[in-house]
Image (spheres, rainbow, N blue to C red):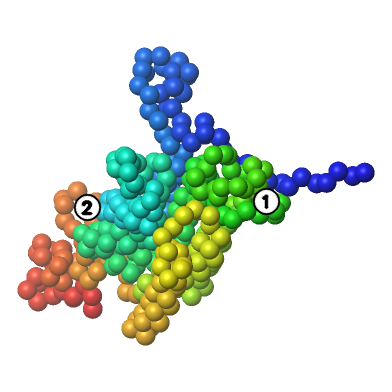
Amino acid sequence: MIPALQPLSIPSPGEEWRAFNLGEWLRELGLTWFSFDILINAYALCILLGIVAAVLLTNARLSRRGAEPWIVLDIALFAVPLGIIGGRIYHVVTHPADYFFPGADLLRVLYIWEGGMAIFGALIGGAIGAYLGCRVTGIRFWAFADALAPGLLLAQAFGRLGNWFNQELFGLPTDLPWGLEIDRPNPAIPVGLPDDILFHPTFLYEIIWNLAGVAVLLLLDARLRVQWGKLLGAYLIWYGVGRSVFETIRLDPSELFLGVRVNVWAAWAAVVLGIVLVLVQRRRHPGVEPGPYQPGREWSPDAGVDSEDVYTETDLTGNDADEVAGKPGSSPATSGTPANA
């Protein structure tokens, strides 16, 4: 008699994989003088890797449009911290029972390395930070947002891998072959379920959906030159549709509004906002963006190269720097063309 096939279940990393002691590793490599223990949480590492991946992709896309290479780092100095703060605040607000109860350690609200980052809060905080960074650097906000859109999905794919390490945000019980194994005890598992029950690997579903979205957005941009924030709108639609589905099968407790999980409402709002953004920007800006910089803030690859410190880019008054310097063949008082002509 042929035995029944066992499910090709997905194992979850054990407790020892959730944090890595860098100090211990260094001592094992022979650096015995290094006596400090430095714990690096796998979840935090996945978030950082996602940020790095998003920065690299965004830098390549923004530079290709004519922006100064690595100007994205200046914007990231504003966007990343505010995005992390916004993501954490949103998570805590939508999961109050995890942090506010009799005898709770309120400092755990700050323990982001233990897990708990809400993408919708991160988007709000990150958008505020990106706007501030764009104001400082002179980059058009919509140009930056469109350059960032595929990178957002890429970063979110890395973040979902962190949920796998933490054994959190998994889905309902399932008998599908790719069910996810979860160690017991786990507060998200309802009382009474058998110990051998498997769960939907929602982290994997979102990783696949997000990576597919990266490909779709890059293809849209390559074929249609989607600008003026419309690619950001496409991102909101893509992510909102997927998240609204995956959120409904998650098992972790969440705040409800009118019987629906708050994150589902947020996903629907993202879809609506994305559609509105595409339609409004299509009507307001049917043409091609003039460039990634705001008028008067343009950057030239040759700026700062001349040994005599004579700049060749157009200054804020619209006069060429060579003309202002009084070079032959031009008059500073009469020549010059506005930078945004």
Q: Is residue 333 left or right of residue 1?
A: left
Q: Which residue corresponds to the image point at 9% horizontal and 72% vertical from the top-left?
A: 331
Q: How many circles with numbers are drawn on the protein? A: 2
Query: Residue 119 shows which numbered tag?
Result: none
Asked whether residue 330 is in view, the answer is no
Locate the C terminus and report the quarter of the image it occupies: bottom left
| Secondary element type, mark 1 | loop
Near-viewer residue (108 or 158): 108
Q: Is residue 162 left or right of residue 309?
A: right
Q: Residues within 10 Å of mark 1 (few under 14, many from 20)?
A: some
Q: Which residue corresponds to the image point at 66% horizontal and 54% vertical from the top-left?
A: 174
Check the image and report above or below for 36 versus 75.
above
Residue at the extreme bottom = 283
Residue indicated by mark 2: 304
In the image, what residue type sits under mark 1? Answer: Trp
- Percent from the top left, x then y, of residue 197? 65, 47
Q: Is residue 170 left or right of residue 127?
A: right
Locate the N terminus and report the quarter of the image it occupies: top right
Check the image and report above or below for 289 versus 309.
below
Q: CA distance from mark 2 to mark 1?
A: 57 Å
The answer to whether marks 2 and 1 mark residues whose Cβ atoms lie closer than 8 Å is no
Residue indicated by mark 1: 178
In the image, what residue type sits under mark 2? Answer: Gly
- Percent from the top left, x then y, of residue 19? 46, 33
Residue at the extreme left = 333
Mark 2 or mark 1, which is nearer to you? 1
Q: Which residue corresponds to the image point at 60% horizontal and 47% vertical from the top-left?
A: 192
- Percent from the top left, x then y, of residue 136? 21, 59
